[in-house]
Structures are given as C-alpha cells and as structure tokens.
Image (cartoon, rainbow, N blue to C red):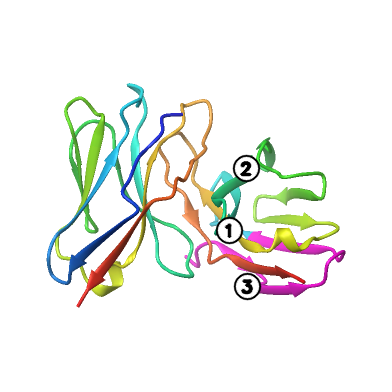
Amino acid sequence: DAGVIQSPRHEVTEMGQEVTLRCKPISGHDYLFWYRQTMMRGLELLIYFNNNVPIDDSGMPEDRFSAKMPNASFSTLKIQPSEPRDSAVYFCASSPGAYQETQYFGPGTRLLVL
Amino acid sequence: DAKTTQPPSMDCAEGRAANLPCNHSTISGNEYVYWYRQIHSQGPQYIIHGLKNNETNEMASLIITEDRKSSTLILPHATLRDTAVYYCIVRAPAATNKLIFGTGTLLAVQP
C-alpha cells in the first residue's frame, strides 16, 4: 500500500494566484481529512469527507478555500485567490471509518505564497 | 471535547525509557485516548490508543490511570529516530470523526 499520496510536495506561488492541492487516500478508506499546520496555530482540521460527502467544513478559514471529493480516490483543496497568510503545510489524511479508526497522514504539501 | 495538557518538551537518553505524561481531567466515559507523533517534516503518525485498560503494541505502551484523568505513553527503549512531537488526543464523541491536536510534547532523544 502506497499510503496517502499528496501532490505537489512543494508549491511556491504569488499572491492572488489559484492554488490546487491534491490528495489520493488509501484505497478502501471512507474518510478523508484536510489539515493545515503553521507555527502560530499548530495543526488544524479544515474539512473532512465521509464517502465523498463533506461532513464538517467548520475549519475552512474563509470563502477563498474550497474542497471537493469527486470520487473515492481523489480530493482537491483549492485556494483562490491565495494570500501570504495561507503559507503553511497542508496535510491530507484518510481513515477506514468508524469511530475508533486511526487516521493515516500523507507527507504534506508545503505552500509558500509570496 | 475534553482538553489535554502536556509538557512542552522533554529529554531522554538514547536506550532509556521515555515516559510522556498527559492530563485529560475532563474526559468523558466514552472517549478514547489517542497518541500520535510527528517527526520533523513528516505527517503525523498514529502510535496507540486506549479506553481504560493499558495497551501495548510494537511501538509503545499506554498506561491510563484508573480514574482516566491522565495517561502516560511509554517508549521502552528510545532511539534517536524517536525524536518528535508527541500529541495526546482525546477523541471527539461518536457523532464525529475529528481529531483535535494540541501543542504536544517535543521529545528530544539525546545520544
């Protein structure tokens, strides 16, 4: 099993540009999570999906952020327009499901917005 | 969700046991205690979890006090590769699947 796959691993962009982060969860996992990590705020949950349906997006910072999961093997997190304060490491994680199940994290995407 | 309190940092000599404490005095009866760790520049990694009994796996042991208000993660023979931030998390109620990460404990294993 390849684990959770994220792309790109690093992204440098200029303020105002659109950024799209991609995630492929572990096959068979019903839950997918997007997290953001910064020095100031630590690791924050942005949104999570169950069976491709967004369940809780209360952590999404503002309307500039959107996430989709068109099928069980792919999800995107989009920032449009990007701002310097969006610079962070974005992690995707997946879980088999059920209450006690653990989450498996990807390697993260390091985003720098200039 | 119950809050957790961990020391910000700890040191441990290589080869010795590392004992990482966590306080969760407001834990509910149906909430599990989870431990994750994050090695520098990597995503968090699951270590172990438990409800009220002590648990052991190939990575660590988890000791939960009888009143469940605190727990200790034990790495029996710490290596340099165990240097990481360790997060103690009390799992949200069954209605959600959320993990709320705190600030964790930075464990530095010294040679």
The secondary element bearing badge 1 is classed as strand
Q: Alpha-carbon neighbours of circle 2 within 10 Å: few (<14), some, or many (≥20)?
A: many
Q: Quadrant of residue B15?
A: bottom left
Q: In the drawing, what numbered circle is on residue A9?
A: 3
Q: Residue at (79%, 57%) from the top-left corner?
A: A79
Front-lying residue, B108 or B41: B108
Amino acid residing under circle 1 = Thr
Residue A78 image position (x, y, % from top left): 77, 56
Looking at the rendered structure, whether the residues under marks 3 and 1 are on a common chain is answered as yes
Give the spatial CA distance, label 3 vs label 2: 20 Å
Give the spatial CA distance, label 1 vs label 2: 19 Å
Q: Nearer the viewer, mark 3 or mark 1?
A: 1
Task: Say if the magenta span includes residue A4.
Answer: yes
Q: Quadrant of residue B52?
A: top left
- Residue A22 drawn above or below residue B105: below
Q: Residue at (75%, 49%) from the top-left corner?
A: A68
Residue A82 image position (x, y, % from top left): 81, 60
Disc 1 or 2, which lies upstream in sequence? 1
Left or right: where does residue B8 sit relative to residue A11? left
Outermost top residue: B29
Chain under disc 3: A
Residue A97 image position (x, y, % from top left): 50, 40
Reading the image, the residue beneath label 1 is: A38
Disc 3 or 2, which lies upstream in sequence? 3
Q: Nearer the viewer, mark 1 or mark 2?
A: 1
Reading the image, the residue beneath label 2 is: A48
